[in-house]
Amino acid sequence: MAPGDGITLQTKVAANGQAMKRWLGKAETAIGNHSDRLNAINIFPVADGDTGTNLYLTVRAAAQALHTDAGRSDVRQPDVGAVLALAGQAAMEQARGNSGTLFSVFLCAAAEPLAGHPRLTSTLLAAALNRAQIRAWSALSDPVPGTMLSVMEAAARAAAAVDAGQNGDDSNHALGLALDAAVEAALAAVIRTEGQLDALQAAHVVDAGGVGMLLILDCLRSAVLGEELQSELLDGLHGYDVQDPHIHNDMPDDDGVEVMCTISLSPLNAATLRQRLDEIGESVIMSQVGAASDAEGNYRWRVHVHVPDADPAVRLIRSLGDPTHITVSELALPRDPEADPVNSNGHER
């Protein structure tokens, strides 16, 4: 789609809190519809075939938070940031896997520059995407290009470049240009992932998390501009043909487990935990849940790590605080097979 094609019907453009609610609802449906194919090409960082499921369950938590009684007042108020903050915190508390955790970090961070604003503009979109990609990169102890991080970064840079050329124009037209550019850049970044990671290049596939992020960004464009999703968006992506088998099935099982939890820690203890988790595990992600501290100066953190054995990691976490929502999942098996799996149509089994 050429830049600007999505903004011919200006009357359909809506960039308020309700549009953000529609965005996440569309994203829940889209990721559900594509979850099986995302699972099929999931080989990095672990070939465990659950990226689609993890991302779907996390996006669903964000979307459903805006449909609860507690969320309705926030959705009604003209504050785009408040709506996304509410959804982001729900996603963070229920995040699944690497992809879900990074998406929840992205959503929470994107809400921050939007706080107090009744509608999204090109400038605010650029600021939100930039804050989100920076926070996602920094949440990982060992961030790797060629993943959904690269897709987030490309979208943010493209939106910023368009906004810089608009001279402060806060019109729907400028916003449409920025959204189109962000999705176009995200697609290009997804295509590049295959050449950025040896595992993807050997399997001749693009990154599963990157494809999921591309779908989420196209849902944002669709929700704001009042257009349908781009049905041809994923055409030609390597490994994404619906007839392909689950590529990870022929790969060696990964030993170890994924440990996740939420915990209140002081900044010092948070830094200590990250350092010590880095020493015993991989794929360490730590992100703050909310901006406020408690009476003792502690902040809530969402913690994610892959380790050979859960016990040392759990003991380490407990030595620094009182964790909640602890989950331990085998990396060699599908995550929580009974926890609302979805089929290729996005329907619960």
Image (spheres, rainbow, N blue to C red):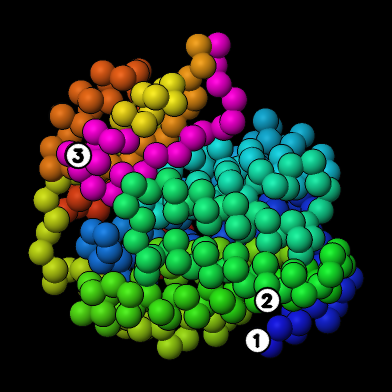
Where is residue 6? Give x, y as percent: 74, 79
Name the residue beneath numbered marker 2: 180
Left-right relation of 271 to 25: left
Question: Mark number for residue 279?
Answer: 3
Question: Mark number for residue 1?
Answer: 1
Is the C terminus in the top left, top right, bottom left or bottom right quadrant?
bottom left
Sequence order check, earlier mark of 2 and 3: 2
On the question of residue 9 being in view, the answer is yes
Q: What's the distance in space between the residues labelled 3 and 1, CA to CA?
A: 46 Å
Provide the secondary structure element on which disc 3 rests: helix
Residue at position x 15%, y 29% in the image: 311
Is the N terminus in the top left, top right, bottom left or bottom right quadrant?
bottom right
Residue at position x 14%, y 56% in the image: 254
Q: Are marks 2 and 1 in contact (CB under 8 Å)?
A: yes
Which amino acid lies under the numbered mark 2 shown in the image of this protein?
Answer: Asp
State whether residue 262 is above or below residue 12. Answer: above
Specify the quadrant of the image occupied by residue 23. Answer: bottom right
